């Protein structure tokens, strides 16, 4: 969602703040702004609603010269995405940017207004600027004033503040939203993630929950949640190139094409190619054999990865599984058994609902495992056992390479659990391990369907909607196909279990309705084909995604065909994810939508 950058620089910082904000665009936003401490000692702001290009235009006509500056991309929560609600918010004494939500802003605002503070926005954030100012006016120095102010806040925040009378100071604090410090050569940075500061430095410090930090150009003084000075370890971040599109037109396309590599990396984490065995490193105290039920909890695409895994876990590891959407989990009073474990799936590791569900499970005493892509994210720190997906930074809002990496980690987990529970023997483990090792090559082959996906995308783009059908593991994949298409092409789409078709959705089928059927040859293939016949009989435009045996067995049908390679059932949904990603991408291109930053969406959803 919102993005933060702050720079204590050696030269004017506005252009670099802008550069960083462009890198943060992937998080989703609807206004942006920048503040700097100008050479005349005044805090000045430039803000604009809409895209960063609008802010760039404002800055071009009224440049900023300060060496100390902060910037923000805002995804509106309290107050419309207008210029006056855009961050930074400021008084004469302080300018600040904020990610998160201040829950007690109303009483604080009323109190400050009664004291004579004038508010110019409808945001919860502005209250922080006035609170700090009131403490400064009462005689506190900027650091003490900021510390006192955050002590009065309820809710979640990551903050970066600069001060009128302190050109060599930037104050940061995190509670509930991540914040990193970047360490440069005589310069210091604050960012909402490593990508924000990656162009300027590779050396960062991840602040821990409850930390605050006073930065000067010489370094950072960090305090923990009890106000005690602490030292946090330094980390090296990936090169700035991770957030570049390279030769690709969009991040999404780049990320789709990275999959053979990201999947090979993720397989390498869990599978020993020499012994053809599968294991989960760093399980800690968790005894897999002692678990007798698993809750799989996530949002959006990550939840569909969980629903695919539900089929694997029940059939291979013979363990009862409950899949939950994170926003429902803790409100439905789930019955958690003494031997239940809870597993969370999240690319960002920051999704508010998934994080809240993780905390709920921990509080209930369940062992927690999390499949996560962003190292050191909040969930990474709070879960008992992390199963990393080594997909690298995912910038496109539509999840692609993170989804297939999640499936890979979940497949490995299934095999390891089945082994621990004695439901598969060594031969089966070797076969499944080989299937995983082979899978990245098959994904590379599946990418060759792009010309066909492009043709189909152009046709689907002209339709009024689209249906996705599948059985077994291809049912959640059908849901994912529909979500992908909806979110980036804005075309209405639904995913259904193929057997559900005649219980309602078949009423939608006519000669204008594309029906995408995911049906590689498996034991359910014939049943899915019966459903295909039903669509065929009603003139629906069928697009069959299948492997060569599946296409061979359906030769008599007049359907459009998209061919993926044959593979073992454990990896088949991973390979079959490629065409649905490419179809969504090309449909969106044909419709001219904003592929990487679709309207209204944020990359990491840090509010409930
Ligand atoms: C995927 O394309 C979506 N943009 C979205 O559904 C996403 O998967 C969901 O918000 C969960 O995010 P997370 O994996 O970062 O928790």
Image (cartoon, rainbow, N blue to C red):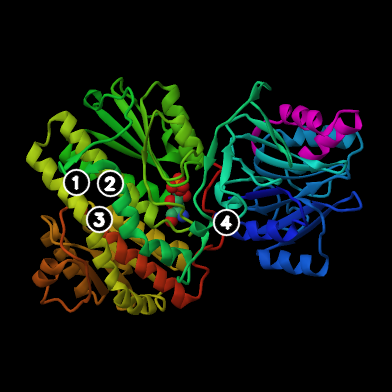
C-alpha gap between disc 1 and disc 2:
8 Å
Task: Return the mark for residue 28.
Answer: 4
- With respect to residue 383, does 398 lie above or below? below
Residue placed under numbered mark 3 in the picture:
573
Q: Is residue 137 found left or right of 308 in the rendered image? A: right
Q: Is mark 3 within 8 Å of ligand 1?
A: no
C-alpha gap between disc 4 and disc 3:
28 Å
- Pick whichever of labels 3 and 2 is earlier in the sequence: 2
Instruction: Tell us which disc is closer to us: 3 or 1.
Output: 1
Q: Is residue 277 found left or right of 513 in the rendered image? A: left
User: What secondary structure do most residues of the magenta stretch adopt?
Assistant: helix
C-alpha gap between disc 4 and disc 2:
32 Å
- The reply to whether discs 4 and 2 touch (Cβ–Cβ < 8 Å) is no
- Pick whichever of labels 4 and 3 is earlier in the sequence: 4
Query: Residue at the spot x=44%, y=64% of the render?
Result: 252
Residue nearest the observer in this picture, 92 or 127: 92
- With respect to residue 233, does 88 lie above or below? below
Q: What stretch is highlighted in magenta?
A: 128-157
Residue count near mark 2 (Cα–Cα under 10 Å), binned few <14, some 14–19, many ≥20 = some
- Residue 188 % position (x, y): 69, 44
- Pick whichever of labels 4 and 2 is earlier in the sequence: 4
Magenta span includes 405: no
**Residue 197 appears anywhere in the view:** yes
Q: Is mark 3 on a helix, strand or loop?
A: helix
Residue placed under numbered mark 1 in the picture:
273
- The reply to whether discs 1 and 2 touch (Cβ–Cβ < 8 Å) is yes
Residue nearest the observer in this picture, 525 or 536: 525
């Amino acid at each position: 969602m919102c993005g933060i950058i702050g720079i204590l620089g050696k030269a004017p910082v506005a252009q670099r703040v802008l550069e960083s904000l462009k890198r943060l665009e992937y998080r989703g936003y609807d206004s942006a702004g920048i503040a700097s401490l100008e050479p005349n000692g005044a805090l000045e702001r430039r803000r604009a609603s809409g895209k960063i290009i609008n802010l760039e235009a404002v800055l071009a006509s009224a440049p900023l010269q300060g060496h100390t500056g902060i910037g923000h991309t805002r995804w509106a929560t309290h107050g419309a995405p207008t210029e006056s609600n855009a961050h930074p918010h400021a008084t004469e004494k302080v300018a600040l940017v904020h990610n998160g939500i201040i829950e007690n802003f109303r009483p604080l605002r009323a109190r400050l207004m009664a004291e004579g503070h004038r508010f110019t926005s409808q945001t919860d954030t502005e209250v922080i600027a006035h609170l700090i100012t009131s403490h400064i006016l009462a005689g506190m120095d900027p650091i003490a004033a900021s510390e006192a102010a955050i002590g009065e806040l309820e809710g979640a925040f990551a903050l970066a503040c600069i001060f009128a009378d302190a050109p060599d100071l930037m104050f940061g604090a995190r509670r509930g939203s991540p914040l990193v410090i970047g360490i440069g050569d005589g310069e210091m940075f604050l960012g909402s993630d490593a990508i924000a500061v990656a162009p300027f430095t590779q050396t960062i410090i991840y602040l821990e929950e409850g930390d605050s930090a006073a930065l000067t150009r010489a370094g950072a003084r960090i305090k923990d949640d009890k106000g005690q000075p602490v030292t946090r370890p330094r980390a090296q971040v990936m090169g700035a190139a991770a957030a570049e599109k390279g030769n690709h037109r969009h991040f999404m396309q780049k990320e789709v094409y990275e999959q053979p590599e990201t999947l090979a990396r993720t397989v390498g984490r869990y599978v020993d190619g020499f012994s053809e065995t599968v294991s989960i490193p760093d399980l800690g105290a968790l005894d897999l054999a002692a678990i007798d039920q698993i809750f799989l909890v996530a949002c959006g695409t990550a939840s569909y990865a969980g629903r695919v895994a539900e089929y694997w876990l029940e059939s291979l590891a013979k363990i009862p599984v409950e899949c939950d959407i994170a926003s429902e989990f803790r409100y439905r009073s789930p019955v958690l058994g003494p031997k239940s474990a809870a597993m969370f799936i999240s690319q960002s590791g920051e999704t508010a609902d998934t994080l809240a569900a993780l905390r709920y499970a921990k509080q209930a005493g369940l062992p927690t495992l999390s499949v996560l892509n962003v190292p050191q994210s909040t969930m990474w720190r709070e879960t008992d056992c992390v199963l990393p997906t080594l997909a690298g930074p995912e910038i496109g809002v539509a999840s692609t390479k993170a989804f297939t990496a999640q499936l890979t980690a979940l497949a490995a987990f299934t095999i390891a659990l089945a082994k621990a529970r004695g439901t598969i023997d060594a031969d089966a483990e070797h076969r499944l391990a080989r299937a995983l090792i082979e899978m990245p090559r098959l994904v590379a082959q599946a990418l060759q369907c792009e010309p066909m996906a492009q043709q189909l995308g152009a046709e689907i783009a002209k339709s009024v909607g689209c249906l996705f059908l599948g059985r077994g593991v291809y049912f959640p994949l059908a849901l994912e196909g529909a979500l992908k298409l909806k979110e980036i092409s804005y075309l209405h789409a639904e995913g259904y279990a193929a057997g559900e078709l005649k219980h309602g959705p078949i009423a939608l089928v006519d000669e204008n309705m594309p029906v995408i059927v995911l049906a590689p040859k498996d034991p359910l293939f014939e049943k899915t084909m019966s459903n295909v016949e039903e669509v065929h009989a009603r003139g629906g435009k069928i697009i069959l995604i299948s492997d060569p045996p599946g296409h061979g067995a359906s030769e008599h049908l007049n359907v459009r065909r998209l061919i993926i390679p044959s593979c073992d059932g454990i990896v088949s949904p991973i390979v079959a994810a490629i065409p649905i990603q490419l179809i969504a991408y090309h449909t969106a291109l044909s419709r001219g939508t904003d592929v990487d930053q679709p309207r209204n969406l944020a990359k990491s959803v840090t509010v409930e």
